[in-house]
Amino acid sequence: MSQTFPAVLIERDETTKTQSVRLSEITLDDLMAGDVTVRVRHTTMNYKDALAITGASPVVRRFPMVPGIDFAGEVVTSDNPGFVAGDAVILNGWGVGEVHMGGYARFARVRGDWLLKQPAGLSGRDCMAIGTAGYTAALCVQRLMALGAKPEAGTVLVTGASGGVGSFAVTLLSALGYRVAASTGRPGEAGYLKALGAAEIIDRAEFAARGRPLGKERFAAAVDSVGGQALATVLGQMAYGGVVAACGLAESFELPTSVMPFILRGVTLAGVDSVMAPRPLREAAWALLAERLDRAALDRITGQTSLDQVTDVAPQLLAGKVRGRLVIDID
Ligand code: NDP
């Protein structure tokens, strides 16, 4: 009989169409197919994990499910030629925590081609403090750079700035020499955002009203993790030739905009996805983080929670009450 180990389990009652979440005990036999088994040491809570745990959005598409779209740990057994026992590895996305059992457990079994070697210069805990949120911020910043956004072109706006993606976007852009404006609904976090490198704090209420299709040209580039009216307003305030990297929907998945920013100012709206991002993009994003992320900023951004607290913390995260990022250590 296999030994049991702790795991958060999301189960669904098909009769009542409701889900329940509990800290349970499972065995290696309960894990899904894969060619690499990993002893998970750290995981994290992302916006999507909070959606999975609360059931606020149907991100879990297989039950029972172990949530956790990110994890870091070491390989225990491998039938994959790319990995041997003892390798330090990380995983972000690929449907893990949605359709394949994820990181909120002592062990995970996954496909080796979903794993990356732990980036040099970052610990497993650092990687989970960064997590999908930080790695997505890096993808957004690289997208802006690939589309020609230069520090001398003007201010870069970051929306949802006190959240996970936003915090990393602020600190990375600042480290790369951009002047950063941080949009937040939490004026009390101005000190935190300035310490991460924001030059200017903007009340997100400024982007809340549906205004004219084009406004004053304020920003050369933007990283947006909120979508909705905020993104629509920001598009109308981009300077000529401006670029927006859009990755999130913390406000809304809708986008009530017009074609005016695109056809009169040549604005580019670039979508960023982390879940299925190809390996070279992932490796480049993690290399940027390992090289340019300010370690003092990483400490400021990082908080802590635990497997037995995730059901309490998830609704707070969705309500925009969590600052930065939360790491979960796995015993
Ligand atoms: P967080 O909850 O940590 O941050 C979201 C932030 O958005 C909040 O902290 C808050 O910032 C702001 N916000 C919350 N509610 C609203 C609202 N109603 N209107 C405007 N702003 C709001 O989440 P993450 O940073 O982890 O993720 C942000 C978004 O990015 C999510 O939608 C997530 O699903 C998405 N995402 C997408 C990825 C992809 O692959 N495309 C990968 C990772 C995340 P403040 O208080 O400072 O205003």
Image (tube, grey):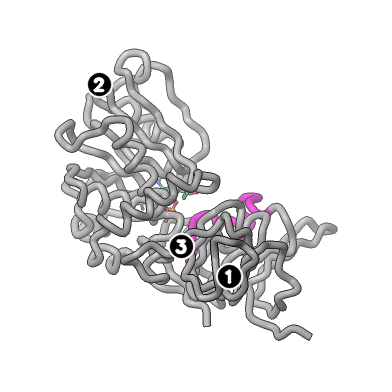
- Magenta span of residues: 44-60
Please name the residue shown 61% across and 57% down the image: 96
Disc 2 marks a residue whose amino acid type is Tyr
Q: Earlier in the sequence, mark 1 or mark 2?
A: 1
Task: Report if the CB atoms under discs 1 and 2 are less than 8 Å apart.
Answer: no
Please name the residue shown 35% across and 30% down the image: 233
* Picture quadrant of residue 291: bottom left
Q: Earlier in the sequence, mark 1 or mark 3?
A: 1
List the residue tagged with mark 1. Answer: 104
Is residue 100 among what the camera can see? yes
List the residue tagged with mark 3. Answer: 117
Please name the residue shown 28% across and 34% down the image: 221
Gap between marks 1 and 2 measured at Cα: 45 Å
Q: Residue 240 carries which label?
A: 2
Q: Is mark 3 on a helix, strand or loop?
A: strand
Q: Is residue 302 above or below residue 241?
A: below
Packing grade of label 1 (10 A; few <14, some 14-19, many >=20) is: many
